[in-house]
Image: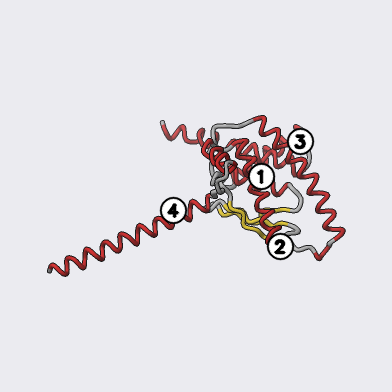
Amino acid sequence: MNLSKTPKWNLVQKLPLLIWLVLVWGALWQDFSAGNLLFGALISLVVFQAFYLPPIELSGRFNVLRAVTFLLWFLKQVTIASFQVLYWAVMKGPRIRNAVIAVPLRSPSDLLMTAVGHVLSLIPGSLVVEVNRGSATLYVHAMNAPTAESVEQVRAGIQDIEARLIRVMGTQAELAALKSEKAGELMLTHADRVRALANHSDAEAHSHGREATTATKKREGEG
């Protein structure tokens, strides 16, 4: 009985990624007509069958108002970035200095990482070149980032994109973390949590090793 339900559950989990791929197809072709979206859906189904795609875990919430706000903000950013890239190309040309920037995200969610990556790729001047799923870190190629301050500005802007998407479809725990940041607490990325867990495990292993050494010496002394 459980085996018969597994394919259906996997399809439900992968449905958000299927919808996202169709939307990205329409955005890349700049054509959201029914025919083009249908063709994009067929391409997405072929991708699903040909390649392994991890199931998407849903948060259980979707804020429509936040989604509309995000869409308007995204269109504004695309317009601004288009003129910025044009200005850099004309005024700076080959003198422009680019950078590949590591951007740790708050959420380890594949859906949010994929969404942030696609949003960045659709905004002129930025492109995701690599993803580390284990630490939820994006490596982004950014134009016109010649100084440490400009690199931090790009990193903060990308983390702001993630925060906006969390308000649209993040978990309640992720929303609570954003509220804590707004109240003045430091941002805690998934990489920070992974690092803290690794340090805690190392400390415990060191403590157990020291206790075992002490116990061994005590038994040798008694012998």
Q: Secondary structure at mark 2?
A: loop
- Label 4 Cα crowd, 10 Å radius (few <14 / some 14-19 / many 20+): few
CB-based contact (under 8 Å), mark 3 and mark 2:
no
CB-based contact (under 8 Å), mark 1 and mark 2:
no
Query: Residue drawn at (22%, 63%), measured in percent from left and top?
Result: 215
Residue at the spot of label 4: 197
1 or 4: tag closer to the N-terminus:
1
3 or 1: tag closer to the N-terminus:
3
1 or 2: tag closer to the N-terminus:
2
| Towards the viewer: 4 or 23 | 23
Distance between mark 2 and mark 4 Cα atoms: 32 Å
* Residue found at the far right of this picture: 90
| Towards the viewer: 158 or 38 | 158
Front: mark 3 or 1: 1
Distance between mark 1 and mark 2 Cα atoms: 22 Å
Distance between mark 4 and mark 3 Cα atoms: 45 Å
Apparent side of residue 196 relative to residue 144 in the rendered image (left or right):
left
Residue 147 - label = 2
Front: mark 2 or 4: 2
Q: Secondary structure at mark 4?
A: helix
Amino acid found under the numbered disc labelled 4: Leu
Residue 161 - label = 1
Apparent side of residue 29 relative to residue 140 in the rendered image (left or right):
right
- Label 1 Cα crowd, 10 Å radius (few <14 / some 14-19 / many 20+): some
Residue at the spot of label 3: 32
Q: Determine whether 139 is above or below 55 in the image.
A: below
At which x and y percent is residue 115?
Answer: 64, 43
CB-based contact (under 8 Å), mark 2 and mark 4:
no
Amino acid found under the numbered disc labelled 2: Thr
